[in-house]
Amino acid sequence: SEAPTPGDRRWLQEFYRAAQDTEQLALDVRDDLLASAASSLARYITAMGAAQTLEGDVVSTHVDAMQQLRVLTRANQAEREALLDGLTKVVDKKLSRAA
């Protein structure tokens, strides 16, 4: 998919739906951490997308983390939890700056 241009609401909506779909699929396979990462991305898109101020690094960090969560097994639970904790901190920091 192409990178969005400023004001591209359609792309933003599609990306948001993809995050929601990923969250539901992760819940279906009982991967709560992956679901939480997708939910974090959706939360960021909701909060920042209204002002159309998404930062590419935050989005790509989420996508990269979700890919890592898919690969890491439950034997790597501490690493998986650290990834999610990092995402939560990034989003909380960005949202507090936007407020």
Image: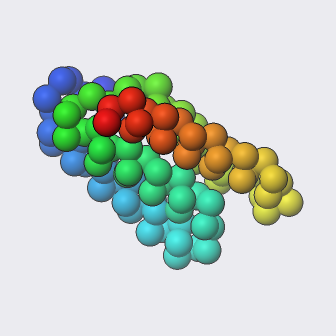
Q: In the picture shown, does residue 54 fall above or below 39?
A: above
Q: Residue at x 62, y 67 (%)?
A: 31
Q: Residue at x 45, y 57 (%)?
A: 39
Decide if residue 19 is in sight here.
yes
Which one is in front, 18 or 94?
94
**Is 9 placed left or right of 73 in the picture?**
left
**Is 60 placed left or right of 97 in the picture?**
right
Q: In the picture shown, does residue 32 fall above or below 9?
A: below
On-image quarter of the C terminus? top left
Q: In the picture shown, does residue 93 fall above or below 77?
A: above
Residue farthest right in this picture: 75
Residue 1 picture quarter: top left
Image coords of residue 55 (percent x, y): 37, 26
Residue 2 picture quarter: top left
Which one is in front, 21 or 36?
36
Which one is in front, 88 or 24?
88
Image coords of residue 49 (percent x, y): 25, 39
Image coords of residue 71 (percent x, y): 70, 50
Decide if residue 67 is in sight here.
no
Q: Residue at x 61, y 74 (%)?
A: 30
Q: Residue at x 38, y 44 (%)?
A: 44
Image coords of residue 47 (percent x, y): 30, 44
